[in-house]
């Protein structure tokens, strides 16, 4: 028996579900199905934010919002004027899901349970008669005169008028082969959120120590980010590092993840400014020991690590510091250089840059400008963001626009 639909969505993730349930709500008579190749749906929704799901980010100025997208920000400005952060919050609120905002701006359901978001989407699918087809991998796409013909690995055939590709990003270029055959340009995928590995570096002895406001630079580039930084047993992580990895994804990838990073632990990136601070401390607190007198609100363990590394002994007073020692400590605080050799990505929350070229998408409807009745949403596109719910916001926005585009 032929399986005919008005809309088929390939991919059971956030963007695919959001597009399907909204399309069904916009046009109740349409026959819509989501096809997922695995047995699991909404996997990233379930694991993101440590199982709490950072649904979006409390950024309500769209011009500011797009600055959190290393790739796709410019293209998303128009879409965000149609469906943005406030619309996401309102959409879930109307369906009984309230959000709360954390200090860093990340927004979670008040239940702090990602299953709340997944269940909301599943309930919407059920109430709007969206069919969910699992364990079905589509291996062939054929554009016929007025329909799409899709063939699964098990030789099942599906037909639809409109086709939405929302199967997410992939680290493998071959995962995009079916789209390349339609004439779409594929930007090679690369990891875009990862931590910095520093094997053998003594800084890893401070694992678990975090700094509230560090500045991170990638040496030899213009990349500079700031925010909390966490020292781990393999190197460095935390929002400042992850943001640097995101904005520097392609440049760092070109270097095979071997590069040097410069860290300002004290939030000042000019060594001379730190020298001035140290001179003021020498004048006002000269009798105190440098080792015990922690400055710049740094964790004690980190401060003492840096002091020792500069060759300053435990008993030295601020007043007795020599010029060379002052300069060395100032450099360690404001321009501490580390060799990075490798990265660590988290499989469950893997984010890639790369995917379908944005030049070939009509961002008013998310329809391909190359193939009629072919639409895209989510991470399959060359769009990615820093941490904090921005990737999900891009999924909700592009999914909503695709739903509108496929039903009007």
Image: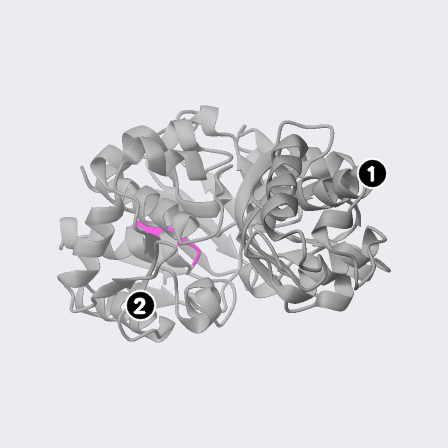
Tell me which numbered mark, 2 or 1, is placed earlier along the sequence. Answer: 2
Residue 243 percent across, percent down from the top left: 55, 45
Magenta-drawn stretch contains 8: yes
Magenta-drawn stretch contains 279: no
Residue 74 percent across, percent down from the top left: 40, 27
Task: State the residue at coordinates (47%, 63%).
Answer: 44
Span highlighted in magenta in the image: 7-11
- Is residue 290 rendered to the left or right of residue 128? right
Say whether residue 160 is visible. yes
Q: Which mark is residue 324?
A: 1
- Report the Cα–Cα distance between label 2 and label 1: 57 Å
Depicted 177 relative to depicted 358: above or below: below
Q: Dot 2 corresponds to which residue?
A: 117
- Is residue 166 rendered to the left or right of residue 6? right
Residue 31 percent across, percent down from the top left: 23, 56
- Is residue 83 rendered to the left or right of residue 214? left
Depicted 38 relative to depicted 211: above or below: below
Task: State the residue at coordinates (69%, 68%).
Answer: 207
Residue 98 percent across, percent down from the top left: 20, 66
Q: What is the chief secondary structure element of the magenta stretch?
A: strand
Q: Tell me the element at label 2.
A: helix
Category of crowding for the residue at label 2, using alpha-carbon neighbours closer than 10 angstroms: few (below 14), some (14–19), many (at least 20)? many
Task: Using the image as rendered, state which of residue 309 and residue 189 is in the foreground.
Answer: 309
Image quarter hosting the N terminus: bottom left
**Quarter-wise, where is residue 337 in the image?**
top right
Depicted 231 relative to depicted 252: above or below: below
């Amino acid at each position: 028996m032929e399986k005919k639909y008005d809309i088929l969505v390939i991919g059971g993730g956030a963007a695919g579900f959001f597009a399907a349930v909204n399309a069904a709500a916009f046009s109740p008579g349409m026959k819509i199905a989501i096809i997922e190749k695995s047995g699991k749906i909404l996997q990233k929704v379930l694991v993101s934010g440590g199982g709490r799901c950072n649904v979006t980010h409390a950024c309500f100025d769209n011009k500011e919002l797009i600055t959190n997208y290393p790739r796709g920000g410019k293209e998303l400005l128009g879409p965000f004027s149609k469906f943005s952060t406030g619309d996401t919050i309102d959409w879930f609120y109307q369906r009984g899901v309230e959000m709360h905002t954390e200090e860093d701006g990340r927004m979670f359901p008040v239940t702090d349970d990602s299953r709340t978001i997944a269940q909301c989407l599943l309930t919407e699918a059920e109430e709007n008669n969206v069919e969910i087809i699992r364990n079905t991998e589509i291996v062939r796409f054929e554009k016929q005169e007025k329909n799409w013909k899709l063939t699964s690995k098990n030789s099942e055939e599906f037909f639809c008028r409109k086709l939405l590709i929302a199967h997410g990003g992939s680290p493998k270029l071959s995962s995009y082969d079916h789209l390349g055959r339609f004439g779409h340009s594929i930007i090679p995928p690369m990891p875009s959120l990862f931590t910095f590995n520093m094997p053998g570096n003594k800084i890893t002895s401070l694992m678990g120590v975090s700094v509230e406001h560090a500045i991170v630079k990638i040496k030899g580039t213009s990349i500079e980010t700031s925010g909390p930084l966490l020292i781990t047993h393999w190197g460095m992580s935390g929002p400042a590092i992850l943001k640097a990895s995101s904005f520097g994804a392609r440049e760092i990838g070109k270097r095979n993840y071997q590069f040097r990073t410069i860290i300002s632990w004290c939030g000042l990136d000019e060594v001379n400014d730190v020298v001035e601070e140290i001179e003021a401390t020498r004048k006002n607190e000269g009798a105190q020991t440098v080792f015990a007198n922690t400055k710049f609100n740094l964790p004690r363990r980190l401060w003492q690590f840096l002091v020792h590394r500069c060759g300053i002994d435990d008993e030295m007073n601020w007043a007795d510091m020599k010029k060379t020692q002052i300069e060395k400590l100032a450099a360690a605080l404001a321009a501490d250089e580390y060799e990075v050799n490798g990265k660590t990505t988290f499989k469950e929350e893997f984010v890639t840059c790369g995917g379908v070229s944005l030049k070939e998408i009509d961002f008013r409807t998310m329809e391909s400008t190359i193939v009629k009745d072919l639409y895209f949403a989510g991470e399959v596109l060359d769009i990615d963001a820093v941490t904090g719910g921005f990737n999900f916001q891009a999924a909700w926005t592009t999914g909503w626009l695709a739903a509108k585009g496929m039903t009007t």
